[in-house]
Every structure is written in C-alpha cells, then in structure tokens.
Amino acid sequence: MIVLIPAYEPGSRLEPVVAGVFAADPDVEVVVVDDGSGPAFTATFDRVAGLGATVLRHDVNRGKAAALRTGFDHAMSAHPGGDVVTADADGQHTVHDILRVADALREDAADGVPMLILGCRAFTGNVPLRSRAGNAMARGIFRLAAGWALSDTQTGLRGIPSELLAWVRAQPGERFAYEQNVLLRCRRDGVATREVPIETVYLDGNASSHFRPVVDSLRVMLPLVLFAGSSLLAFAVDTVVLLALNALTGLLVPSIVAARVVSASVNFAVNRRVVFRGEPRGRMLRQGARYALLAVALLASNIVWLDALTRYGVPLVVAKIATEAVLFVTSYGVQRSFVFGTQQARAELVSRPDARHRSPIAAAARMDQSEHPIGRNP
C-alpha cells in the first residue's frame, strides 16, 4: 500500500501526517512529491525523508496533476501491484481517514471487486464560506456534467486499486481539473466507485488550500461550456438555414427538416472532435447511428413545439429559442451517456499474481531530469 501526497509549499501539518501514517502502519510506503516548492521548503522535505518517506522533486511548480502523475509513475515502477491512496498535504486528511480508505481498498481486494474509493466530507459544522460555496458549486456542475451525484467532488483523499492505476494515470487534464476528469469518466469507462465518509477538517480558515473556487470550478465546467458552444453554433446554423428556406419556400416543416439535417451534421462533427474528444475514433459509424436516432427524436419534438407555438401566435424566432432551450439539457445528457459515452469498453483491469501484496521496495522510478527521488533506500 502506497500513500501518495503531492505537496506545494506545505505548512506544518505535512510532517505529523507522514509520521502518523508510519506509526499506525509501518508496512505502508509514503511517497511525497515536492511540486517545485523552492529552497525555502527544502528543510521540510528533508525532514519528511528522514521520517522514512520517499520524496520526489519537481524543479518548478507543475501543478497537482503533474505531481500525482509523477507519484503514479513511481508507484507503478517501484511498487508494481501496489494500491495507492492519495492524500493532501495541508492536514485536511487525518491519519485515521487515510488508513480508513486504505482499509476500504483491502476490503474490496478481499471481495475481488476493485473500486475507486472516494473519501467524502459531509461539509457540516464550521466550514469556511469559501469552501462551502466552492463545493456546492462543484457538486451542482458535476451532477449536470457527469449525470450522477457525488457528495464531495473535490476530495483529494482517494483509494486507487492497482488494477485501475494506469487508467487513472492516463486521464487528461491539468491541475485540479485532472482529478475532476477522473470522476467524469468513471461511468463512461465502467469504473465503479464508492464513498467512504471522512471527517470535515478546515485549519486556519482553509488558508493552506490552493483550490480557487471560481477559476477551478470554471475549469471543471469546460465540458459543459464546450457543449454549450457547440449547441450555440448548431442553433445559429439551424436558425439561419430555417429562416432562409422558410422565406424562399413558405413551407415550415420541410424547412425545419432541412435546417436540422445541416445543423445536426455540424453539431455531430464538433461534439465528436471537440466536446467528447476522449472517445475512440474508430467507432464513428456507431456513434453516427446513435446520434441520428437522437437527432430524429429531437427533430420530432422540435416540429411539435414549433408548430404548436407558432399556431398560438408566437413569432418563429421566439418559438425557436424557447424550444432549443428546453431541448438543450436533454440533448447533452443523451449525447454524454448514449451517443458518445457508452462506446468505450470497461477500463482494462490488469491482474497480477502479486496485485494485492506489498511489494519489496524496488529501484526508484525513472524520472526526467527535473525529478529527483530521495528518502528510503532499498
């Protein structure tokens, strides 16, 4: 079992957490990634290494995603078959909760059902307004974007079974958006998750947190924003073609059909290449067929609504805007889960004979020139 802690300019809580983990479970390996904290924090990381942790260094700050990937690379190389628990360096994750997530991984291993374990806070009690608002915003955005509810989308306390480590490592994104992308792709890739309740801890008003509620929540919204932009483009194409054809022919229904064919083609191409770009390219025909089914359903609904509204005297442009607004959310959900979201096979689980046993310490993972492991020796 490896406890991985990415750290950037850590405060005084890092050392007690590392010491507490070793005291509670001497068999656990602790890996700390110094994400370019600078010379002022060298002594802190040296003391952490003195406690027995392996410290990997970035010469410059590269963000939490890069620090996690560095730790994952080291875990897979130096401790093949080892499960990983990721924890934050700011003291918000107690030793008890870190080990609780580790125990959950062991329980799943015994049951033969590897899952991504998420240590989730309840956000009750004396929670800073900044954190409460940021988490509420993130939960709402996540539910809309992912199609399933999670009580704590920002938790950094996660248990990753060895079978899923390569999958987690391969997910796209930088900084805090990377951790969100892992969650957003779980259902798509058939990765099971379960929540483990943990203590809600905020120290010094959460001053040590590097999470920025507005900026980082906007980054989490990116898939939804891209979809909205794609839909807006398709709406503009559809509206222009509809108005032009209706003016030329005076035939509303044929104009609606022709406009929708043009705009749907544009929308499919943009969504496949930009919005849902993580999907396999080789399955365009299947995706296209499913998109066509959705387009027909939306077209039928569009015709019914436009015809009804215009019959009651609503101007065509106004009726068009109202109709598209109603269909937007439905279209996003169906495209995410049906058209593009179910094509990829379940995440490959790599089974090894020693997958659930603590491996002896191997040579340090090979890093690029900006990463220097120090700490425990073989």
Image (cartoon, rainbow, N blue to C red):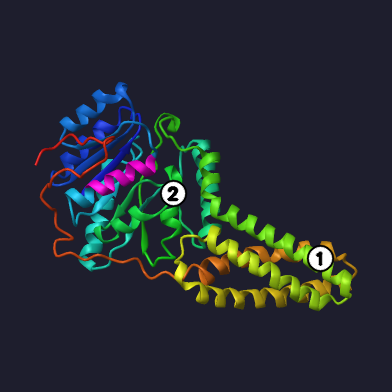
Q: Which residue is drawn at the image coordinates 41% and 36% (left, top)?
A: 202
The secondary structure type at the circle numbered 2 is loop
Q: Position of residue 167 (x, y in %)?
A: 33, 58
Residue 69 within the magenta-colored segment of the rendering: yes
**Could you say which quadrant of the image residue 18 lies in?**
top left
Q: Which residue is drawn at the image coordinates 24% and 45% (left, top)?
A: 3
Asked whether residue 30 appears in the rendered view, the answer is: yes
Camera-side residue of 366 and 135: 366
Using the image, tell me which numbered label, if any, was put on residue 319: 1
Magenta-tinted stretch = 64-74
The secondary structure type at the circle numbered 1 is helix
Give the foreground label among 2 and 1. Answer: 2
Prevalent SS, magenta region: helix
Q: Amino acid at mark 1?
A: Ala
Camera-side residue of 220 and 367: 367
Report the side of 312 relative to 351 (left or right): right
Give the spatial CA distance, label 2 vs label 1: 39 Å
